[in-house]
Image (cartoon, rainbow, N blue to C red):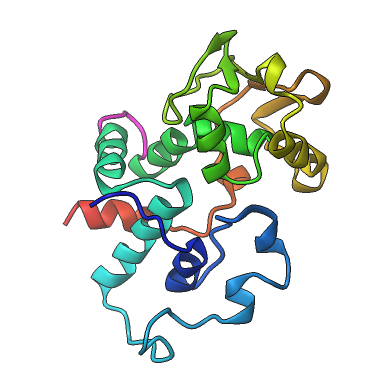
Amino acid sequence: MGRYTGSVCRLCRREGVKLFLKGPRCFTEKCAIDRRSTIPGQHGAARPRLTEYSLQLREKQKLKRIYGLVETQFKRYFFSAERKKEITGEALLVLLESRLDNIVYRAGFALSRKQARMLIRQNHFQVNGSAVNIPSSQVLLNDFVEVRAGSRALIPVKEAMARVEARGVPDWLELEQGLFKATVTGRPTKEAMALPVNEQLVVELYSR
């Protein structure tokens, strides 16, 4: 199955929580969850009782949709996390948080992860001084991400940077706003991620 190209607001409504897929709109009265919290579709008003499997599946779908992944990508991340000598759920979250598109979003260079992916593919960012245009690239401890000099006047970047103080930057990233540069100074923590997901249910789903 290809990447979803429909309305991202429908995804939030399907999961019943804000996934913050549309940047600033999610914080306004126009947010689909605030205006219409029912599941999309003809029978959306009727919420059936969820089975154990359904609960696990919904948590997996939330995580996939938050980071904008397709099923094959998500499985690859899960099995990579499973091979690590740590709690699988936490290792999975760290791998997802360490993606370049997520770092760009968390640092405040983009208003959403979707916008971050677009900007990265258009060669507007560097990692450790080298141009990188692959959104899934892993950014490691002490690596730094910066907006290329010729891209700092872009309207999407300027709009995102204008909101960075209100949004905040996680404590494992050090942002040098004047230099358009962010450095990974620590390990992403679950508390800083603040995701509406129970990752243990995702682990249980793949362990069935």
Left or right placement of residue 195 versus residue 43 in this view: right
Residue shown at 29% from the left, 40% from the top? 73
Of 91 and 127, nearer the camera is 127
Q: Locate the C terminus and report the quarter of the image it occupies.
A: bottom left
Residue shown at 65% from the left, 62% from the top? 26
Q: Relative to 28, does residue 115 appear above or below in the rendering?
A: above
Residue shown at 42% from the left, 54% from the top? 65
Left or right placement of residue 71 versus residue 44 in this view: left
Magenta run includes residue 165: no
Q: Which residues are magenta?
A: 83-87
| Occupied quadrant, residue 127 | top right
Left or right placement of residue 12 versus residue 5 in this view: right
Report x, y in % for residue 136.
41, 30
Report x, y in % for residue 99.
47, 31
Left or right placement of residue 9 versus residue 57 in this view: right
Residue shown at 32% from the left, 85% from the top? 49
